[in-house]
Amino acid sequence: MLEHDQRRNPRFDVQLPCQIWSPFRAFDSLAGVTLNMSRAGLLFSPDLGVEGRVLPEAGHAVRVTLQLPGTELEQARCVECLGRIVRLEDRDNSRRIALEFRRYHFTDRGRSPRRG
């Protein structure tokens, strides 16, 4: 049986360095890369070595930092996002985390908030 695709926005294959963490310390912060993005969310693949760490669960609130590339004329920037985890996938020895955005804003790369 085929699953119905519930995406509301087109996805774009974009690989950007990314970090996620819990604003309520419900799970450990994870670094990795985006696999695809839309204006409403993204699919994230954490770096290997998550064993022994507290991992996010569906429904958890999440903060995200995406590192955007700079140009010759413009400094590299970050996008800070607030959202929630909507799906977790384990396949082919890899983990994927889907999340939706609630809010986001752009910041200078060096001005990212502390994630402790």
Image: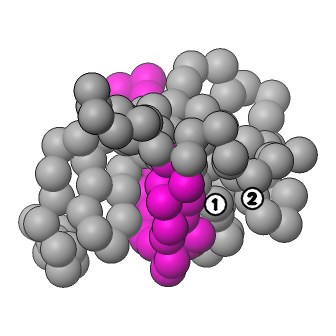
> What residue is at 50 percent from the left and 67 percent from the top?
105
Label 2 neighbour load within 10 Å: few <14, some 14-19, many 20+ = many
The image quadrant of residue 47 is top right
**Quadrant that contains the N terminus:** bottom left
Mark on residue 22? Answer: 2
> Residue at 67% of width from left, 70% of height from top?
61
Left or right for 15, reference 112: left
> At 36% from the left edge and 56% from the top edge, which residue is drawn?
42
Mark 2 falls on what kind of element? loop
- Residue at image coords 28%, 55%: 37
The first of marks 1 and 2 along the sequence is 2
- Principal SS element in the magenta part? strand
In this rendering, the count of numbered labels is 2
Quick one: 74 or 98, which is closer to the camera? 74
When the figure is inspected, residue 86 is found, relative to residue 48, above or below; the finding is below
Left or right of residue 7: residue 91: right
The answer to whether residue 66 is left or right of residue 62 is: left
Whether 88 is among the magenta residues is yes
Distance (Cα) linking label 1 and label 2: 6 Å
Cβ–Cβ under 8 Å for marks 1 and 2: yes
**Mark 1 is on which residue type?**
Arg
- SS for callout 1: strand
Task: Please give the range of residues in magenta.
Answer: 78-107
Disc 1 designates what residue? 63
Amino acid type, mark 2: Ser
- Please tell me whether residue 46 is drawn above or below residue 13 in the rendered image: above
Residue 33: x percent and y percent? 43, 33
Quadrant in the rendering for residue 50? top right
Q: Is residue 21 left or right of residue 13?
A: right
